Amino acid sequence: MAAAVTAAPPPAIATTLSTLLRRSKNCIHSLRASRRRCIYSDVVAEPAPAPPPPSRRGGHAGTRLEEAVPAGEGRSRVDAWISARLGGGGVSRARVQASIRAGLVAVNGRPVSKVSHTVKGGDTVSCTVSDLTPLRAEAEDIPLDIVYEDEHVLVVNKPAHMVVHPAPGNANGTLVNAILHHCKISTFTCLARNSIDDECPESSDDDVDVFDVDQFNIGDVSSEVREAIVRPGIVHRLDKGTSGLLVVAKDEHSHAQLAEQFKLHTISRVYLSLTCGLPSPYSARIEVPISRDPNNRIRMVAAPGSGHRYAKDAASRYKVREVFCGGGSALVEWRLETGRTHQIRAHAKYLGNPLLGDETYGATKSMALSLLRPKTPSKYHGDLSNLISKIDRPCLHAALLGFKHPHSGKALEFSCPPPDDFTEVLDELRRVTLTSDGQDSDGVAQFSD
């Protein structure tokens, strides 16, 4: 683990985050009040010519590619190599990946089944693009906490327990279903996607990603959808259990521009979490690759060294903001340099301080209590037990999101305090800490920007 003192955040971001933390010390507010406390910069996007309507792709079933990798060309993933050659024809990378998994791709005459298979100069690649069964997402009247909206982008404050996009077996109740209703689109036919990488679980939510809305089955789509220009484009994701800010693109240009900002790591993202125990040192940078846990498909693992074949580089910066119960827990701020699946959760586990409520990564209720009780008077042990028993998700919240508007280029910054369930835990930890220490509010161990 590479550890170094975190550089001071940009003043605007630091000020906004400090405001959020001060506000979160107040009494618990209703959901409606919480929405009013979301903050965004007072920026109006400059008018720009509307982007052209999205291309309507055909089925592409039977599209074939047989080509040799140019001599001297470096190694690359077979799905990426094929996509680069067929992408101009409207064939999505997800479609190519499905074709690989279906056994329709061969390298040097031998079928390959892994999308991450490596090809190199001199290899001969043959591929037939598969005809896929579309997944129909229905509009659903699900309330959205909209922080910002214009004709190009939508910023929402996602509640915990909401899945971002539909998937086979989970086609309803998602953020995309809610956005379809909000954008007045009754149904949408979309490519039933798997994970970007076959080494990642299908439930992954943190990877920067394009949700491929693919109108290839035009005959089965209503005229309303065929004529629709607004398409909900999920550019990045949050775990089902993670609350907070997420940006949605409304047109292809915005989608591409935002995706490029994520790729270049110019997006500002700040998360708040509550941990089991106290990270040491208080401020550091973690640069440890992340891979799928070979023993648990729905979990990732920090994999230092080169022992994991499919590990991806991952870097996070964290800073302890407050300490509770003598180090039994802490409020920790996270800033992502990369956007890997479950990155914060895996890096927190690597530190030995998994997030409160994150049983997938080892934060069991017994572990949390074993850390909170030792330096807390016994009269508060019952309160702590009740508190921990109510936590039903990892205590992680995407508190701040900043990016350049994809059309005007103006800097936009949004922030929103944690929801009630997170705030209730935070307030109770503060109460127990202060009361057991016999101190006022200034007695909580806090760390400034």
Image (spheres, helix red, strand yellow):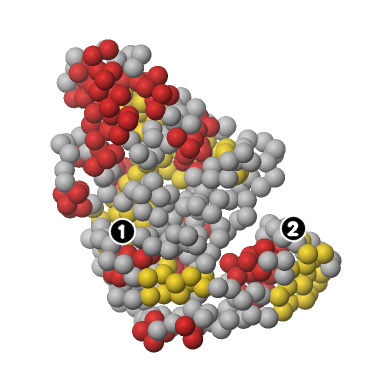
Judge by depth and name the residue closer to the eye, 68 or 421: 421
Please determine whether, in this image, residue 412 is positioned above or below residue 285: below
Asked if residue 77 lies left or right of residue 285, the reply is right
Judge by depth and name the residue closer to the eye, 334 or 3: 334
Asked if residue 184 lies left or right of residue 166, the reply is left
Q: Pinpoint residue 157: horizontal percent, then vertical percent.
A: 30, 54
**Residue 34 visible from this viewpoint:** yes
**Which residue, given by chain and number where applicable, does mark 2 sit on?**
118
Report the amino acid beneath label 2: Thr
Q: Quadrant of residue 436?
A: top left
Residue positioned 28% across, 18% down in the render: 381
Q: Which mark is residue 156?
A: 1
Please determine whether, in this image, residue 395 is positioned above or below residue 374: below
Asked if residue 123 lies left or right of residue 191, the reply is right
Q: Quadrant of the N terminus?
A: top right
Asked if residue 58 lies left or right of residue 385, the reply is right
**Mark before the other along the chain sequence, 2 or 1:** 2
Q: Secondary structure at mark 2?
A: strand
- Within 10 Å of the Cα at label 2, are there few (<14), some (14-19), or many (20+) other Cα atoms? some
Residue positioned 50% across, 62% down in the render: 168
Q: Secondary structure at mark 1?
A: strand
Report the amino acid beneath label 1: Val
**Residue 319 visible from this viewpoint:** no
Q: Pinpoint residue 321: horizontal percent, then vertical percent.
A: 33, 31
Cα–Cα gap, marks 2 and 1: 38 Å
